[in-house]
Image: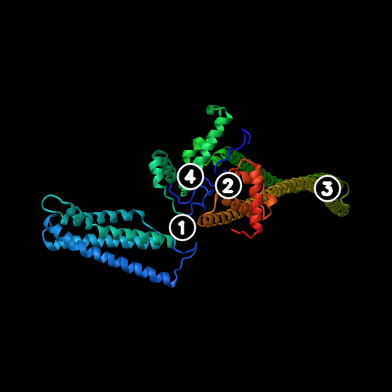
Amino acid sequence: MTITDWPRTVADPDPDSAAPAAVSGAREPVSQTLDIVSEPQSGTGLESGAGRLTGTQKWAAGAIVSAALVLAGIGLYLSFEHVAVFAHEELRFGSLGKGQLFAVGVDVGIMVMIAVDLLMAWLKRPISWIRYPVWLLTAATVVLNAASGAPEGAWQLLDYVAAGAHGVVPVLFIMVVELGRTSIDRIVRPDRAERDSIPWLRWILAPVATARIFRRMRLWGVTSYPEMICRDQQLIAYEQWLKRKHHGDISQASEDELLPMKMAPYGYTVAQALAMPDEQDQAALEREEEVERRRRAAETRREVADADATAERLRAQGKVETVRAEVDGQTAQARAHAKAQASAAERAAEMEEQALETALVAEARAREAQAARLEAQEREAKAAADVRTAELERQAAEKRRLAAEADRVAAAEAQAIETQTIAEARAVAAEANRRAAETEEAAAETRRRAAEADRHAAEETERQALADARTQAARQGEAEAEYRAAEVRLAAAEIERAAVEAEDIARLTPRQRAVRKVARMILTQADGIAERLPLADIQRELSVASPGTASEYRAEATELLTQGYRP
């Protein structure tokens, strides 16, 4: 091992250890490194998940409950009279009946709280604080019983024994109740982790260090005492490795290298503390990627919204242009009609006026001619009258002809004006239609771009969902692999524990134990083929410095397996 290699301790650091438990007092262990070693034996005879008792167990439980009730009755009977008389005489209750009611109230209160405590434990809803009033009232009962038997004068040794005897039955009853409560809790919650107790010998030999370990186990929810010892050994080994790496001056170590010492009081293992910078960097990178993804999604949504708004605006403009062209065409057509009608009316008035002037002139000339004829030829009056009538008819016909010609010209001009106006209106309408078509084409292009943006956004969402699904599948595969590895480790630990117990019973020598341990390693790590088990693993597990010795152990283990050894 070079100076930069990871230092080896009693157990290699587990990178898959869970994070420290919450301060709320969760009972789950912080790390799974030594859960198999620290698993408490419940002693209930029930496997994990078994919730039913056999017939024999039910009879045994009924007998225990009956005996506990008998014990409670004996305690009530022994303490009732003494407490009642002592309450009346010494505690200044008014009468013996009131003293008896006091004794009954205390005993009934104790029994009610005990019953509620056992019931809630049975319902998996235990009330942790209810046992303390029970202990307090029981202690008060013990004190009252002892006080009722106190001597009048000086105390003798037998007086102390008598006073202590008054508290034997109540204390025994409380112990039975606590035992029943713990038994119920283990039956209804078989999977609940139990906290290991620290050996008293360690408290005596190293009280300060043991108090520190006890504090860390309580603060960070570590239930396994061997695991906490392993953590301390790992931390000490890591600190020694740092001193050797930096030639005894640990202050030269970087902040990341000092993390195990800084984070150990907070429940972190050496492996967890060393992995913390990488985990935090990875978490920061994931947060940045999430922020970038959200920003891109927001930009895509904004572009889609802008495209939709542009399309709506263009469609509105097209509708406005179309309506405007229609209104302009209708207005131009109405103006052309009005102009044609006014021009025709003016021309008709001018022709009528000209015809009227021509008729007046002709009438004046006729009158002059008539006067001349009357003076020249009186005999030709009738002929002149006939001539005048014919002339008037001719003039009327001419006037009608001129009026008809004026009407025809006016109608032709009006028709020409109307045709030109209609053509202009049609040209304006065509121009409006062309603009509306261009507007609709622009709107269609905008909709196409919006659809393209939606398609890109959908593809991006689909790619992101596919990536998330692959990530989830990878994580699930890792979790399954970790679960299978944990099962393998559990089976190996069970085999190792059973083998060690068998070796203890057989009282084997250390070499025989080492050979059997190598044989178990061949079975669990090399699939039963000895050559696949590296000598370095044997040296590490058995703390053997010589490869030759490790080779001898492997050869003897192979021979032992050939003889049929199976743990």
Among the two numbered marks 1 and 4 on one chain, the one whose residue lies closer to the N terminus: 1
Tell me which amino acid carries mark 3.
Answer: Ala
What residue is at 42 percent from the left and 49 percent from the top? 197
Q: Secondary structure at mark 2?
A: loop
Q: Earlier in the sequence, mark 4 or mark 2?
A: 2
> Quarter of the image holding residue 382?
bottom right
User: Which image quadrant: the N terminus?
Assistant: top right
Q: Kindly identify which residue carries mark 3.
A: 416
Q: Which residue is mark 2?
A: 16
Give the labeled residue for mark 1: 41
Crowd rating for badge 3 (residues with CA inside 10 Å; few <14, some 14–19, many 20+): few
Residue 402: give x, y in percent of width and height: 84, 49
Q: Nearer the viewer, residue 409 or 95?
A: 95
Circles 1 and 4 in contact, beta carbons < 8 Å: no
Foreground of the two, 492 or 282 = 492
Q: Is residue 42 visible?
A: yes
Helix, strand or loop at mark 3:
helix
